[in-house]
Amino acid sequence: MAYDTRTIDAGSGVTISIRTVGTGRPVLLIPSMGRSVNDYNAITELLAAQGHRVILPEPRGIDGSSGPPPHDLFDLARDNAAVLAALDLGPVDVVGHAFGNRVARALAAIEPDRIGRVVLLAGGGQTVMSEAVRAALMGAVADGIKPDSERLADLKTAFFFPGNDPSVWLRGWYPEVADWQLASSERTDTARWWTAGRAPVLLVQAEGDPIAPAGNADALSAAIGDRLTLVRLRCASHAILPEQPQAVAALLGDYLSGQSDARTLQNLSDSLIV
C-alpha cells in the first residue's frame, strides 16, 4: 500500500509529520511514551485492508515532528487535534497505546464532536505502579545511556510478558521525548482526561501489565459504566503491540466496525493469542 506523507503547522512553534494509508473511516494512532508511531506498523496495513484510513502522526521530537517540550497532556492532544483539522476529518476513531492512551483520552475530552470511538491499549492512569516497576520503565527508555544487558532486564520487568522477546524493543526509543512526555503527564490532573469525554471506549487490558495493572480497568468501569467495553488480553504486558499484534489488529478491526459486543471480542482475542 502507498503511504501519503505530509507535514502540518500545528501552531505555537509545533510541526507534525503525518503518514496516512488506506481509505474509509479514519482512525488515528498514538504511540507509547518516547516511541514512534512506527510501533503500529505491524497492524497498520491490516487496518487499511479492513477499510480504514489510518492516520499516523509522529509526536513532537520524533521523525520530522518538532516543537518545544509540551506543558501538559493537552498540548499533545492539541497537536493531534490540529492534524485532524488539517486533514478535515470527522468523526475519527482514536487508538492510544500505553502513554498514548492518556493523549487519546485528552483528545476525546477536548474534541467530543470530532472523536468517535476510543481504544486504549494498556490503559493506565490511576492505579500507581510500584517503585521497582517505575525504575525499570525509566531504565528501558534509557537507550544509549544504560547498557543493553541491563535494559533487557528492565524491558522484561516493565514491558514484556514472560516468554515474550524483549529485544524487539531495545531500539526505537527517544529518551528526551520520553522525559518531556512524562513531565507533561505529571503536570496534568488525571480527572481532566480520565473519562475520554463522552466517547465509547474499548480498553484492552493486558494480563501481565505492571505499569497499567487491572485496577485501572476497574476504576474506568466505575467511572464511565456502559460506555466501556473491556477485553482482557492473555500473554501480554505493557508492550502489547509487538507481543500480540494479530490479536490487537483483529480486536481493533472488529470493535471499530461497531458490530461486536464484549463477549465476541473476548472470544476473538482468546482465539488469536500466540
Image (cartoon, grey):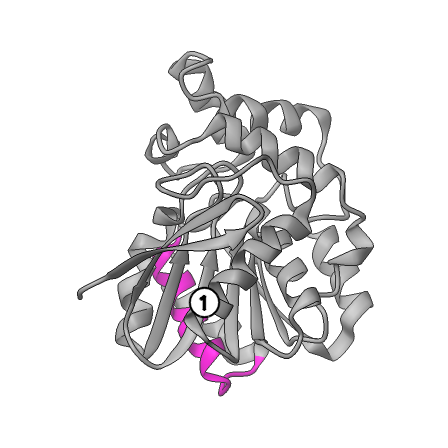
Residue 205, percent from left and from top? 59, 57
Is residue 257 found inside the magenta-colored segment of the image?
A: yes
Residue 33, percent from left and from top? 53, 40
- As helix, strand or loop, the secondary structure at mark 1 comes to helix
In this rendered view, identify the residue nearer to me: 234 or 174: 174
In this rendered view, identify the residue nearer to me: 257 or 251: 257
Going 39% across and 58% down the picture, which residue do you hit?
56
Residue 109, percent from left and from top? 70, 66
Q: How many marks?
A: 1
Q: In which quarter of the image is residue 167?
A: top left
The magenta region covers 244-261
Q: Residue furthest bottom?
A: 259
Q: In which quarter of the image is residue 66?
A: top left
Quadrant where the N terminus sits is: bottom left
Residue 208, percent from left and from top? 57, 45
Residue identified by numbered label 1? 86
Q: Magenta residues: mostly which secondary structure?
A: helix
Looking at the image, residue 189 lies above or below residue 251: above
Looking at the image, residue 173 lies above or below residue 124: above
* Residue 120 seen: yes
Looking at the image, residue 14 lies above or below residue 141: below
Is residue 139 found inside the magenta-colored segment of the image?
A: no
In this rendered view, identify the residue nearer to me: 226 or 31: 31
- Mark 1 is on which residue type? Ala
* Mark 1 Cα-neighbour bin, 10 Å: few <14, some 14–19, many ≥20: few
* Residue 213 seen: no
Going 49% across and 77% down the picture, which residue do you hit?
255
Quadrant where the C terminus sits is: bottom left
In this rendered view, identify the residue nearer to me: 26 or 18: 18
Going 52% across and 80% down the picture, which residue do you hit?
91
